[in-house]
Amino acid sequence: MDWQRLHIDKTLLFALLGLAIISLFVVYSGSAKDMNATLGHLMRLLLGFTVLVVVAQLRPEILERWSPYVFIGGMLLLIAVLAIGVIGKGAQRWLDIGLFRFQPSEMMKLAVPMMLAWFLARANLPPSLPRLATAFLMMAVPALLIMKQPDLGTALLIFGAGIFVLFLAGMRWRVILVLLAGVAVAAPFAWNLLHDYQRQRVLTMFNPEADPLGTGYHTIQAMIAVGSGGIYGKGWLNSSQAHLDYLPESSTDFIFAVFAEEFGLLGSLLLVAIYTLIVARSMLIAYLAKDTYTRLLAGSLSLTFFLYFFVNMGMVTGILPIVGIPLPVMSYGGTSIVTIMAAFGILMSIQTHRKITE
Amino acid sequence: MLNIPIKDHFRESRLFNTRLTVIGSVVLVLILALFFRLVYLQVFAHRHFETLSQANRVKPLPIQPPRGLILDRQGIILAQNYPVYTLEIIPEQVQDMNSLLEELKQVVNLNEADLKNFRKQLRERPRFENLLLRSHLTEEEAARVATRRTYFSGVELEARLQRHYPLAGLGVHFLGYVARINEQELERIDKATYRGMQHIGKLGVELSYEKILLGQVGFEKVETNAHGRSLRILERIAPVAGKNLQLHIDAKLQALAEQALGQRRGAVIAMDPVTGGVLAFASTPTYDPNPFVNGIDPDSYNALLNNPDKPLINRALNGQYAPGSTIKAFLGLAALETSEFDAGKPVVCPGWFTLPGSSHQFRDWKKGGHGVVNLHDAVVQSCDVYFYKLAVAMEVDAIKKFLTPFGFGNRTGVDLQGESEGLLPSVEWKKARGQKWYPGETVVTGIGQGPVLVTPLQLAAATSVLANHGLRPKPRLVRAIVDAKTGVARETETESFPPIPLKNKQHLDIMIQNLTDVVHTNKGTAYGIGYNAPYKIAGKTGTAQVRSIAQGQAYSEKLTPERFRDHALFVSFAPVGDPKVAVAVIVENGGHGSSAAAPIARKVMDHVILGKAPAATGEARPLLENEE
């Protein structure tokens, strides 16, 4: 089969398929054997892979040309959400467009790195200070808008995606140092901007025992699940933590805890290995890319994917605070699966069109 | 490619690759960190977490702390807790609510009110919360529920501490009550502090001392089996009971004051003038706070709300009344203090007063007038014309300036929330409302009519200032905060406002003598309570108009509908020389201060000073020369 002609990257595809198959079993277990939830997850995966295949057919030049429009459109939708969005889960994130509810912040996960890559590719690298400042605004404004929704997890991912582009574009070290110093100074102010529950989560990370019934509860229960899994795990469907309802969000944000409890260290390491393989392959695609735009975009997307799974696993294993970031591909629900698959579609497009156009 | 300025592709790709390598190393390090974390959790700490997981069947459950008791000064319990079995339902765990309710009806007695109340909660409260279906289950009902519990999903049988007010309506207006935490409060309160709690202070002392009464939630780690049923308690962090409050209030005196008011609407405040301690705080009619604790049913609530006597209104704290002639107790002192008026000069009272250039007659309450009166006579007989003249000489702004230090027109600072301010009018105040101050308004201010408004609590506090030689402690309900466990009592500190400014301290003594003569001389308006008193009382009667009387018409109590009759007022303190109690009484539409309000004050003072209810007087009350 000529994968190249189909514009599919075999390594990425099989790794993603592997994750998808594992995820169906874990969602089934994590949702307390809810067949409807499992089928729902399967439907989303199918939609995601379809989007992947379609996006992979688009030539990178087309993506590049569309970048500013996608970004501007995304920004308008984001503002629309703030203005007329309906309340979903106590937060203003959704835009109801009749048939389905659409989350513009998901779109920005792709639009921001696309826009920054497009913008920085307009001039020589490394970018000049004014261009850097402009680029910074392009990512900070949407990130702040999303933080206000409030959706700290997504804001963090978008901010990360933007930072990755700037870093890969060769932002100078002294600028980075100045920025780091700025962050240190601004941290107390940013602290004030956070919602109470977000602050609580950060505080709890340092001392989860302080509030055993409240926010610390999630962290403690997740760590108990992971730790009690041991080397070999308790076996599929035997996560007592999930089934006795100790573990919150056991089929969504905390699905890794269920997995680690049931499949133990061996399972966890296999999963980490698959994720690492995906990140490594994506970074290789960035390394091999032939022009600035595709390089920056591919680099940013692969690193954002890394950030995604690292933050989620970090939160489940108690080394990072609890932010609402699902484990990509594995977690049940949400529109994020489509976004992630679209990102891999872009990566495959970059990889496969390069060889043809050469 | 698109038209881009000439680029050094080689340099750019080298720069990019360097950066990619740098960040790739960071990624590698972080993935290694994750790897080691997993190895640590799943290999080295495995035993620890395995144990926890086994014990996890261990659920931390909040334990409600007992709320602090509220006691009167003698230790009589005004608010307490007692354990009751409650039947609660968690809606999200219920498959079919209607059939569940039908089944529960077979097990416990559920009446319409219970169901109505439950459905109301069902509409308003989150689905994961325990909603009360019935409280006060009998032992038998509780046992029946307990044995059938496994069949009912989402049904909880709880033993809860229930707030109870054993004296029912007594002192409800200062005591207040607790009730279920509502949506707005849920936003405001710290959820950790209130975990597992369902009630919060809504009014009165229960509200203003909420933090002290509340206590601290405890935790119990309970081992449960796979079905969530509790097996045994593993660990317990005991709750800390809320602190008890000992009040200055004397429950017996409170009862006496409420009974003395009887069916009438009114308020009685009794204060220790030296400490500011409030001994009685009565507002009638009262109502029973107990039904509010678990949510009063709408019918009973509407009945209270629509009762024409408005029992829910706190008349002592929020009732704003014209002070009438009781204001003369204070303005008499102004007559001595002000330089605008010569208190040494007698005044002729023909029974009416006119302003220069006007024919409008301001009448004296006594037809034909009091003749030639000095300050002493004017206070004792409550001569209106004397005080009309004083007010005109002083002008309204100076009156306001003089009365403000007594606490009129401002909150008294009592330890209750939502106190009303009353009103001391001024030219400025009228102007702010876009109106002009008329000289006629100054005239009536002299006898406590017109826009001036006071609360019963302000009147009592201001009377205390007279009794206390110008010192002004804040009124306080709570005397001490008592640790429920150790019994250690911490007295609340007496806070004071600055003493009233006086040019000459003797003026106050003169005025106290005048007020004593109001009660103890046969020309005095309150001689009816003073002729047989075994101790000296200083006091002042007042009668405040509710409806204005047209020029040339006379007021007739009999011909006026009850709601438009005058309010009766009386302020007093006793014993003169060593004051133990200051009292303010208002009886709405009660008629004369001397006959409706003063006898109530006498009963209150007798109780405080003689320690008993006054002996039933067989003696005939002397015919009063002056009954204002």
Image (tube, coloured by chain):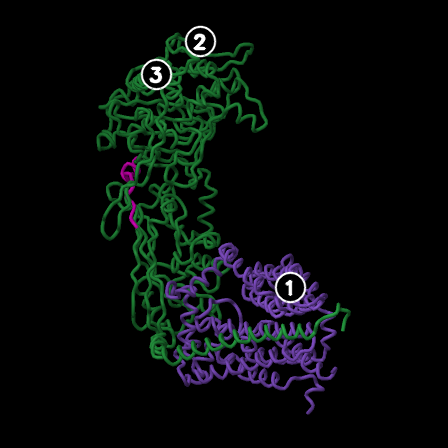
Chain colours: A purple, B green
Viewer-side label of 1, 3: 1
Question: Which residue is painted at 44% across and 35% down in the image?
Answer: B420
Q: Would you call the spot at circle 3 few (<14 residues within 10 Å), some (14-19), or many (20 or more)?
A: many
Asked whether A174 or B262 is in front, the reply is: A174
Give yes or no for residue B370 being in the magenta stretch. Answer: no
Viewer-side label of 3, 2: 3
Local secondary structure at mark 1: strand
In this rendering, position of residue A288 left or right of residue A236: right
Q: CA distance from mark 3 to mark 2?
A: 17 Å
Mark 2, residue position? B350
Bounds of the magenta segment: B243-256
Q: Position of residue A226 (x, y in %)?
A: 42, 77
Mark 1, residue position? A95
Mark 3, residue position? B380
Q: Position of residue B150 (x, y in %)?
A: 38, 74
Disc number for residue B104: none
Amino acid type, label 2? Pro
Whether residue A332 is visible, yes or no, is no
Local secondary structure at mark 3: helix
Amino acid type, label 1? Leu
Whether residue B207 is visible, yes or no, is yes
Mark 3 belongs to which subunit? B
